[in-house]
Image (cartoon, grey):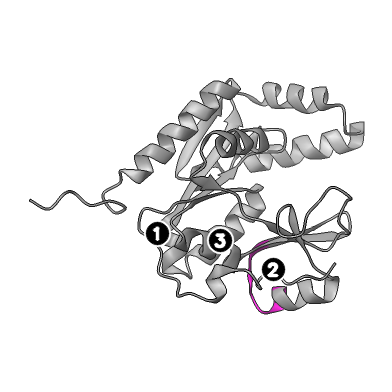
Amino acid sequence: MTNDPTSADPAKTVDESIPPSALLIMLSAPSGGGKTTLKDQILATHPEVVGAVTCTTRSPRPEEREGIDYYFLDPGDFLKRVQAGEFLEHATVYGNSYGILKSEVLGKLHQGKDVILNVDVQGAATICARAREDAHLQHALVTVFLTPANFETLETRLKHRGTDSPEELERRLSLARHEIAQWKNFHYLIISTTIPEDVRRMEAIIEAERMCQTRSKAPVC
């Protein structure tokens, strides 16, 4: 269970110079806002965009593969990495820890790949803080907030999932109100409508960022 995620990590063996066109796309939304679906749609249709493998302390399920689905760490190793500041963000959920290594993201950006992260609002704030300490991450970072047009739509989505008790549903809705208020802290806002339209808007954001003057160069005349 304790394979080392940095053993095959290019960021540990190369310098951290990153192509200026590489994007770190950070997608966030309130619970039930559709960020996982949007991220999966982008990954399925854009081979130049990749995800980041998350570290976790939970045991692997039978179908999960080391380094593909997760990096599986024992709690002691995970804690050491937290203390060493190796994670862009990390959290504990239901007794298990999860985190995204900075080296995992930098390694893929160095290869010229665009990386998309799906994180909650708290994790997004942590990543933005870490990016302010690293010029490479700061240049690559593009933040996108996805939310339904109104709170009633979000409430309906959460209820239709049918996975939460009434108490848990109320907790999620209370948290969602706080999360939605953070939209002003992101570069872009997508008001969710349909999955195809959400994907189209995300694609427009990615395309616009690739054409940004700081990420590209005009032909030399």
Between 177 and 220, the one lying in front of the other is 220
Q: Residue at x 29, y 54 (%)?
A: 214
Q: Any magenta on residue 35?
A: no
Q: Amino acid at mark 1?
A: His
Q: Amino acid at mark 3?
A: Val
> What's the magenta region?
82-89
Instruction: Name which of mark 3 and mark 2 comes first in the sequence.
Output: 2
Q: CA distance from mark 3 to mark 2?
A: 12 Å
Q: Secondary structure at mark 3?
A: helix
- Kindly report which numbered mark, 2 or 1, lies closer to the viewer in this rendering: 2
x then y, percent, for residue 119 = 64, 49
Q: What residue does disc 2 label?
A: 5
Q: Any magenta on residue 88?
A: yes
Q: Amino acid at mark 2?
A: Pro
- In contact (CB < 8 Å): disc 2 and disc 1: no
- 132 in relation to 32, above or below: below
Res 153 → quadrant: top right
Q: What residue does disc 1 label?
A: 139
Q: CA distance from mark 2 to mark 1?
A: 25 Å
Picture disc at residue 105: 3
Q: CA distance from mark 3 to mark 1?
A: 13 Å
